[in-house]
Amino acid sequence: MNSTVGVGSVLSILHDQHMRTRELLHHVADSSGPERRRAFDALRRLLAVHEAAEDFVLRPAARMAVPRPIVLARIGEERQATDTLERLELLDLASRAFREGFLAFTVTLLSHMWHEETHEWLPLETSWSEEQQLTLGARLRRAFGRDPAGAGPAGEIELTGFRPSPVFGALFQEAVDRLAESRPGNGASGYFEIATAGARVCARTLPDRAAR
Ligand SMILES: [Fe+2]
Ligand SMILES: [Fe+2]
């Protein structure tokens, strides 16, 4: 998708992240031992970066182009996926419970990504200018590095300086902090309008930061 603007646009970056997410979902399911752990951690980091980018960059900028009910439906799907992910974080990755839970998580996430690409992103491709798409894309690159979709061998993501954590809420908070630091000097209206899934996650896992 998004062939009209291409490399560096916000939709291109988010699409690359979706593709990377699909790869990592397969990698976690098909691997075992330390390799599964690395792939699962890479997936958690990527989802934290991606969810923060959607909540705090894409959706505030897209609120005039995408009907609110569509956005709320996507946020509901993200909450469901996050709930499942947080339960998976507590499990032994070699356990049957993890395998079964991860399968359900995969189904939820694949469906959610298809809905976003179809109902959220396609309208933005036509309603946003090339300059707008590239400006928002540059923001993600400032926050998360040269390759915000993550690259590297064996499903590892090279997001410079990203602190490891066993808790998704902490990863998400770091991603939000990075986006806040990357905010242009003139401010972005509506930046914190949609505090949705992230705020809920942080309220549960990072109570000392929830009030920020
Ligand atoms: Fe999403
Ligand atoms: Fe997404």
Image: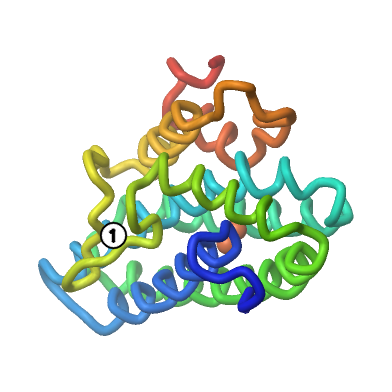
Residue 134's spot in the image, x, y percent? 58, 54
Indicate whether 47 appears above or below 193: below
Left or right placement of residue 190 versus residue 46 in this view = right
What residue is drawn where x is 66% and y is 53%? 131
> Which quadrant of the picture is home to ligand 1?
bottom right
How did the renderer colour the structure? Answer: rainbow
Residue 82: % across, % down? 52, 52
Q: Label 1: state its secondary structure.
A: helix
The kind of residue tagged 1 is: Ala
The mark total stands at 1
Q: Position of residue 104 (x, y in %)?
A: 50, 73
Residue drawn at (34%, 73%), measured in percent from left and top?
A: 24
Pointer 1 residue = 42
Left or right of residue 94, residue 85 in this image: right
Depth check: give the residue in front, 98 or 27: 27
Q: Quadrant of the C terminus?
A: top right
On screen, 23 above or below 126?
A: below
* Residue at the spot 31% in from the left edge and 51% down from the top edge: 90
Label 1 CB less than 8 angstroms from ligand 2: no
Quarter assignment of residue 110: bottom right
Between 138 and 210, the residue placed more toward the observer is 138
Query: In the figure, residue 3 lies in which quadrant?
Result: bottom right
Toward the front, the furthest residue is: 131
Residue pictured at 74% horizontal, 58% vertical: 129
- On the rendered image, what quadrant is the N terminus found in? bottom right
Q: Is residue 136 above or below residue 150?
A: above
